[in-house]
Image (cartoon, rainbow, N blue to C red):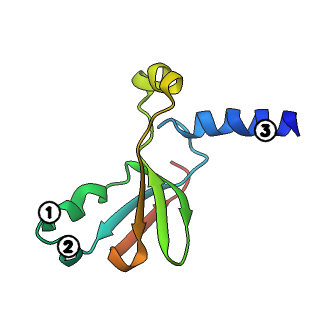
Amino acid sequence: SVLGASVGAKHARTDMLETSSSLPSVSVADDPAQFQPYPDEYLAFNTLDYKLLLRTKENVFFFSPIKTARSTAVAQSRNFDVYVLPMSKIRRIRIQRGM
């Protein structure tokens, strides 16, 4: 079990990087009506610059991968941005594998 946890942790560290292809890329188009009085915020996730962690019936979990130039510093601090959006606020999801 210790070996399995070690291998899993190693895979998780590499999956956080933008160069990893094991997690699919995702873009999320939010419903702008849900973000009043700031309707322009729905464009924040409208590119394939994010990686999908999990999609359930209620929520989508995704993150902004670590840029390769920052990988050493961020891997040491273990901080990166994770987003959770409820399906009720999402207009469209695009998932792309193998990039």
What amino acid does circle 1 point to?
A: Asp
Q: What residue is pinned by disc 1?
A: 40
| Mark closer to the observer (3, 1) | 3
For the point 30% across and 68% down, the residue is: 29
Q: Position of residue 55 (x, y in %)?
A: 54, 67
Furthest toward the left, the residue is 37
Real-space CA distance between mark 2 and mark 3, rounded to the nearest whole angstrom: 41 Å
Earlier-in-chain disc, 2 versus 3: 3
Disc 3 crowd rating (10 Å Cα; few below 14, some 14-19, many 20+) is few
Q: What residue is pinned by disc 3?
A: 5
| Mark closer to the observer (2, 3) | 3
SS at mark 1 in the image: helix
For the point 68% across and 37% down, the residue is: 11
Q: Position of residue 40 (x, y in %)?
A: 14, 63
SS at mark 3 in the image: helix
> On the image, which quarter does residue 92 sit in?
bottom left
Earlier-in-chain disc, 3 versus 1: 3
Q: What residue is pinned by disc 2?
A: 32
